[in-house]
Structure formats: C-alpha cells, structure tokens
Amino acid sequence: QVQLVESGGGLVQPGGSLRLSCAAPGRIFSINRMGWYRQAPGKQRELVATISSGGSTNYADSVKGRFTISRDNAKNTVSLQMNSLKPEDTAVYYCNAYPTYWGQGTQVTVSS
C-alpha cells in the first residue's frame, strides 16, 4: 500500500504563512504528477495545485500568487508554500500522487 506522509499544518493568523510537505515512495514520486487538494467543512474536495514530473505547475485561481508548489526529486518530496493566508483557506489539505494515491490529510486553520 502506497503511503504519502504529510506534515506542516497548523494554526496561523490571517496574512501569515505555512509550508506543507509530503513524502512519497520513490517509485511513485518519480513518475507521477503530484498535487495538493483541500476540503473545507461541508464542501467538496478541491484542487489547490499540481506539479508534473517535469516541473510544470497548475494552480486554482483562488491561490494564484499566494501559494507555490515545488518538488525535490532527490528527496521524493513535494511542498506547498502558502503565503498571505486567508480564513477561507481553512481546510484539511491532502497530498496526492496521480491518480489515486492520497495522504491522510493535515489541518490548516487560518484564524485570529
């Protein structure tokens, strides 16, 4: 069973920053598109950002200019740098290795 291990969630004030990280097995990481999704209470899971094995990125409109996804191919990790956080960014954030591998989720709460 493939395990994706996330870290870095927490509580932050509006305007603050957090960095999420996700570690994946090498055999999955090297060939797959990686991504971050989020799910807020009462809402469907939505795409936040993806990055291909070649480094091409894609972002949801709501996070463009504030979030940056990156990958470290030597460490088999993908990260999400989140700046200028807003209360509406509050959600459980999930790491994904395309198409069907998921992490357990990490809570991000933006509140004063």
Image: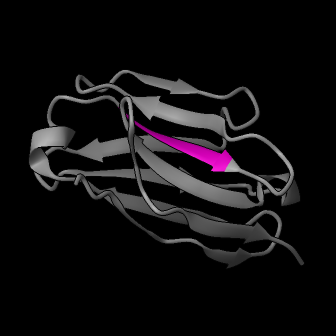
Which image quarter: residue 92? bottom right
Closest to the observer, 101 or 57: 101
Relative vertical location of residue 90 with respect to residue 13 in this rendering, above or below: above
> Quick check: 3 left or right of 45?
left
Pinpoint residue 112: horizontal percent, then vertical percent.
90, 78
Residue that appears at 72% across and 58% down: 91
Residue that appears at 66% across and 43% down: 66
State the scheme by which the image is colored: one colour
Please tell me whether residue 103 belongs to the stretch shown in magenta.
Answer: no
Which image quarter: residue 87? bottom right
Please tell me whether residue 36 belongs to the stretch shown in magenta.
Answer: yes
Pinpoint residue 16: horizontal percent, then vertical percent.
71, 67
Q: Name the quadrant of the N terminus.
A: bottom left
Closest to the observer, 43 or 89: 43
Pinpoint residue 104: horizontal percent, then vertical percent.
47, 63
Pinpoint residue 111: horizontal percent, then vertical percent.
86, 73
Residue that appears at 44% across and 25% down: 57
> Quick check: 69 left or right of 48?
left
The magenta region covers 34-38
Residue that appears at 68% across and 41% down: 45
> Quick check: 21 left or right of 44?
left
Q: What main secondary structure does the magenta stretch of the protein show?
A: strand
Closest to the observer, 72 or 40: 40
Which image quarter: residue 60? top right
Closest to the observer, 15 or 74: 74
Residue at the outermost front position: 1
Relative vertical location of residue 8 with respect to residue 82 in this rendering, above or below: below
Relative vertical location of residue 17 with respect to residue 62 in this rendering, above or below: below
